[in-house]
Image (tube, rainbow, N blue to C red):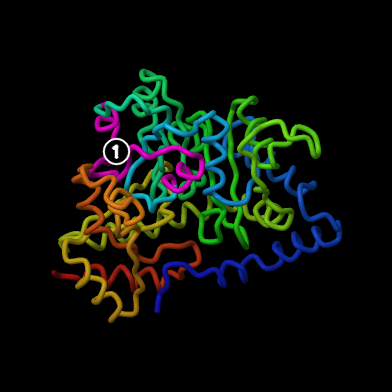
Amino acid sequence: MILLNDLKRAAHAEAQQLFEAAQRVFDSGWYVLGREVAAFEQMFADYCGVGHCIGVGNGTDALELSMRALGLGRGDGVVMAANAGMYAATAAMQAGCHPVYCDVDETTMLICPDAMARLDDPSIKAVVVTHLYGLLAAMPALLAVARRRNWSVIEDCAQAHGAQRDGRRAGAWGDLAAFSFYPTKNLGAVGDGGAVVTADAELAAAVRTLSQYGWGTKYEVLRSGGCNSRLDELQAAVLAARLPALDQANARRRAIAGRYAAAIAGTGLLMHHGAGDDHVHHLCILRCTEREAFRDFLHEQGVASDIHYPVPDHRQQVWAGQYNPVQLPVTERLAREVVTVPCHPWMTDAEVEKVATHLADWRP
């Protein structure tokens, strides 16, 4: 079976670097908030083109801490897309906010600036822009809408490490940006991890304080809403070792996606594809109106697939019908059609060709 991802191959390919990084941490005897975290935070801030990076426990914490740093809380609405796995909504609920769902663009599958401009909800204080599947959203247009309304902007970059447009990377557009370093991400750790990046020194200081209990100095709590969310030394060392290869790995993902795009001509399949630097293909997404039959076909050929994501946020059971009146026709159609196929830097050329051949063979 050709898998969607293969973390064992990644570890084997980078074994020497990872062992050296781990050994350095073990030799130091310092496992939390040490030199490795500080070094990675500087590296990643420089990579993203911003002044500040704060390592945290995971990507969801990064979103929640960003909301809290902006002063968001009970009664505040946060605009977000409903096709991105409920992660931003979970963070909003943890911060005491509530989601305001917005439909997405048919082609990009990302939050639609025109749909966002039509929102009329006085509770809205901020927007989470998710660069879903690795494609950088239409940030100039989205920022223009948000600035007119005096809404803060948080980028959710969990699937878009390294995506850039006009020389400006994901994470360098909004007031704050949240990253996940979950092992399957384009830049992944060997456990959980995340970060918040920002160009704003005051927001950076707020996030750093909130991520460590709300402390100003040790054992002195200055801010409410603090938690214990820290990137550890081992994960930071691993991430620092992997960061220099990120752009090359992203280029490999684009090449694989390009091969698939060429293969599906005439099949009835549609592809969420971009060949430019603004798409890093964290996930390779196809659209198929006969999805279950297509997935059965792939399985028979030894090709794994998945659905990201099958249930739109506003239709999740946790809301107990609260969002039933909300109609997001594009989002709901995509949830019935999207299919994820294998695309990762450690695929062999033979595996890529096998997947491409089977995609070309599909007929509904």
Q: Tell me which segment is drawn in magenta.
A: 88-117
User: Relative to 206, does residue 329 appear above or below in the rendering?
Assistant: below
Residue 153 horizontal/vertical position (percent): 45, 30
- Label 1, residues with CA under 10 Å away: few <14, some 14-19, many ≥20: many
User: Relative to 332, does residue 306 appear above or below in the rendering?
Assistant: below
How many numbered discs sit on the rendered protein? 1
Q: Residue at x 26, y 40 (%)?
A: 103
Classify residue 316 as left or right of residue 66.
Answer: left
Specify the amino acid type for callout 1. Answer: Cys
Residue 144 horizontal/vertical position (percent): 36, 22
Q: Residue at x 41, y 43 (%)?
A: 131
Q: In the rendered image, which quarter contains the C terminus?
A: bottom left
Classify residue 39 as left or right of residue 82.
Answer: right
Magenta stretch containing residue 111, yes or no? yes
Magenta stretch containing residue 112, yes or no? yes
Q: Residue at x 54, y 50 (%)?
A: 180
Q: In this view of the protein, which residue sits in the foreground, 331 or 108?
A: 331
Helix, strand or loop for disc 1:
strand
Q: Quadrant of residue 338?
A: bottom left
Q: In the rendered image, which quarter contains the N terminus?
A: bottom left
Q: In this view of the protein, which residue sits in the foreground, 171 or 56?
A: 56
Residue 314 horizontal/vertical position (percent): 30, 48
Mark 1 = which residue? Answer: 102
Residue 285 horizontal/vertical position (percent): 32, 57
Classify residue 63 as left or right of residue 290.
Answer: right
User: Relative to 179, does residue 78 appear above or below in the rendering?
Assistant: above
